[in-house]
Amino acid sequence: MVAPPVRQNSGGTTPRVRPHATTLNIPGMTKSLVSPDGKIADRDVAAKLVVIMVGLPARGKSYITKKIRRYLSWQQHNTRIFNVGNRRRQTANAPSAPQQGRGTASDTVAQAADILRRDSQAFRDASAQKEMPTLEGVESVDQSAKFFDPYNSEAAKFRDQLALETLHELLDYLISGGGAVGILDATNSTIKRRQMLFDTIKAREPRLGVLFIESVCTNPNILEANMRLKLSGPDYKDKDPVQSLADFKERVKAYESAYEPLGDYEEDHGMQYIKMIDVGKKLTHFGLDGFLSNGIAHYLSSFNLSPRQIWITRHGQSTDNLQGLIGGNSELTERGHYYSLNLYRFITQKRKEWLVEQKNKIAQSSFPPLPGDKSPPYPDLNRELEEKNTCVWTSMLTRSIQTAEYFEADEDYDVKHWEMLNELNAGKFEGMSYEQIAREHTDEYIKRQRNKLHYIYPGVGGEGYLQVINRLRDMVREIERIKDHLVIIGHRSVCRVLLAYFMDLTTDDIADLDMPLGMIYAIEPKPYGIEFHAYKYNEEKAWFDELPGYKSQKTVDPNA
């Protein structure tokens, strides 16, 4: 018998010094000796990524970072946002204490807090003369636009130090905290600042990837809307909106005077970057290296701010549902057919209500918004609303297709069947009940109960939730891209995975999310996130009742 191989290094150097390959990692779809679960291994530092945001205030950076984090986390890549502005606000509230040297993050907080509490009037006088200012008496987080003046060298010093402390926290997360992607959310508006950050990263871990993402806004309507959205943020909450808007615009002017966009410098120094204009209207990139950077670029290219509705529901009751069987390709019961009829009637009515509501918003609003308006409408609202189609997507399984039969008969709907929306394949357990699996395949039943997210059904074609996430990756990008309304008639696992993406659920929640028959979930993307509504089928009324304040919850059925 041939002896098993002994792990060694066939290269010329022991131990190996050459960085390991950084090929695609997909949890549930790839595995290796160092990464049996398919995630980026701690050893593979070169596959990890630091994303550094670039852009003037009110250009949608935080909106972009939150969507990137949600998308990557949904794909099981551990991702976290590190916001320099949040650290600045915490600094302004920190107790004053004498500190010396660079010290720790808490030292920096205390030092910067001293600066932020100095006399704001003295600061304004000095700033006007381009001299070294002092910042006294600034209350709590009420930091005026003058703090961001590039001529204020003392404040600039502490802005840089706060950025570095935030960056070091990010690097700790990637290097020793199990992270895959860390996003530094700040303006980072000068070449000097970006080079400082780049050098700091490479000094701590030269193998880490660094991607700059710049958000540029040339549309004055989007820019005005973004600025007014800031009035409800932590810097201006509960303050006079007119004065707050004026102060914020002064802050933007301070940054604009020294702003240096991404471009020739980064290209000359081999720094990869993505430049995003008007929230996805135009996208350019340079030197993308690695599957994470390329995946982010593909995702960013699908953004749009068009007002629309996304409806997600399971199919109507099937004959297998009645018998408690999983998988299969059964037809609807009579109750299931009635569900499909009432679903069609309900969605049709909701489309009409939505159109009236949007037209009322247009009639009652002005764009650009008037002074003091804290809730700007969509910049795209003036588009002809009647142009919006409503797409209906089903799986290729009979029960899903039949649930869309009334939509199919109405020429006003565009119906399409997708294989990637099929229910999770239960392999050799297709057509069995969970009780039968527990009796006849006890070990497999227990394995699934212990870890439903990572469990894969045995047999030909058997899948798990991670496989469903992977096959829905392109569909999520398509959902983000289209500007029309969308109705998705899916299955339990598919609806769980899609809702986990839109509701930003943790990995622990996906496989146990309560997803009964007869529920409809309505999602309206907004510039600040999503608006969410849930409706429950009322069979007696042949209609759907809204569930106000609905929160996602775990299923009470241990088998579901």
Image (cartoon, helix red, strand yellow):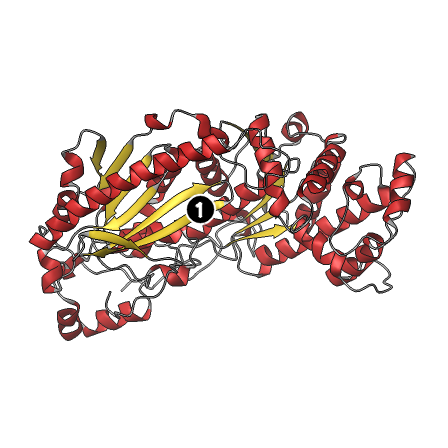
Residue 431 visible? The answer is no
Residue at horizontal 9 percent and vertical 64 percent from the top: 323
Q: Is residue 360 left or right of residue 448?
A: right
**Residue 521 location in percent, x, y?**
32, 51
Classify 126 as above or below 280.
below
Which residue in the structure is indicated by mark 1? 530
Q: Amino acid at mark 1?
A: Ile
Q: Is residue 509 left or right of residue 221?
A: left
Q: Local crowd at mark 1 within 10 Å, few (<14), some, or many (≥20)?
A: few
For the N terminus, the image quarter is bottom left
Return the residue nearer the eye: 200 or 85: 85
Return the residue nearer the eye: 218 or 240: 240
Return the residue nearer the eye: 78 or 326: 326
Residue 100 visible? The answer is yes
**Residue 113 location in percent, x, y?**
80, 57
**Residue 37 location in percent, x, y?**
39, 58
Q: Is residue 405 left or right of residue 220?
A: left
